[in-house]
Amino acid sequence: MGQVASKQQLRMAFLRWAIVIVPLVLMLGILSGRLSGSGFGNPWFAALAKPAFMPPGWAFGAAWTILYLLIGFAFAMIVAARGARRRGLAIGLFVAQLALNLAWSPLFFAGHQVSAALILMIVLIVLAAATTLAFARIRPVAGTLMLPYLAWLLFAGALNLTIDRMNPDAEALAPGTARTQIMP
């Protein structure tokens, strides 16, 4: 009963968790984006003024796919770390930040709430940073896998802030309409 698991048993426990968690995290991310109409195909989003540092549309799909895979693997490492001190806190932080992550696209793209999405993004960044630190204390590799995600969230936050400043009337902009400065 008090036996220590072998490295092979630990690796297999991680793999079992990863087989479930990684696709689940990826699918949730994809579902959130698709259901909210995220991306450049959204008429409301297309009508917004965007900063010069806005990447092309394809970059978002590629980046988020990679990031969801990385954080999925990081989370699987933590879930598989049975008996690790503060594991429950780390899991709770991850779930909380993932819930905010999944809520951002519907708030921004479907709800057209650019300012509210910015506030959500700030809270998300704080929770993701806390999650990264909690993961690093349990499994340093898991913390390292979270770093690209955290960096992208900071970049996404800068985009959100700039779009908010460039489009003070974004919430009132009707989907599919473009703004002009032409006066009759």
Image (cartoon, rainbow, N blue to C red):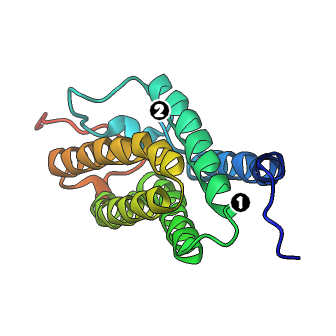
Disc 2, SS: helix
User: Which quarter of the figure has residue 5?
Assistant: bottom right
Identity of the residue furthest to the front in this view: 3
Q: In the picture provided, is 73 more to the left or to the right than 141? A: right
Q: What residue type is labelled 1?
A: Ala
Q: In the picture provided, is 78 more to the left or to the right than 6? A: left
Camera-side residue: 55 or 44?
55
Mark toward the viewer: 1 or 2:
1
Residue sitting at 27 percent across and 62 percent down? 115
Which residue carries the number 1 mark? Answer: 80
Residue 111: give x, y in percent of width and height: 45, 61
Residue 96: give x, y in percent of width and height: 51, 71
The disc at residue 60 is 2
Camera-side residue: 28 or 12?
12
User: Which quarter of the figure has residue 13?
Assistant: bottom right
Give the mark nearer the N terminus: 1 vs 2.
2
Q: In the picture provided, is 43 more to the left or to the right than 160? A: right
Camera-side residue: 132 or 47?
132
Q: In the picture provided, is 106 more to the left or to the right than 172? A: right
Residue sitting at 39 percent across and 23 percent down? 56
Query: Is residue 134 visible to us here?
Result: yes
- Placement of 61 over or under 1, stated as above or below: above
Residue 175: give x, y in percent of width and height: 43, 47
Disc 1, SS: loop
- Placement of 143 over or under 43, stated as above or below: below
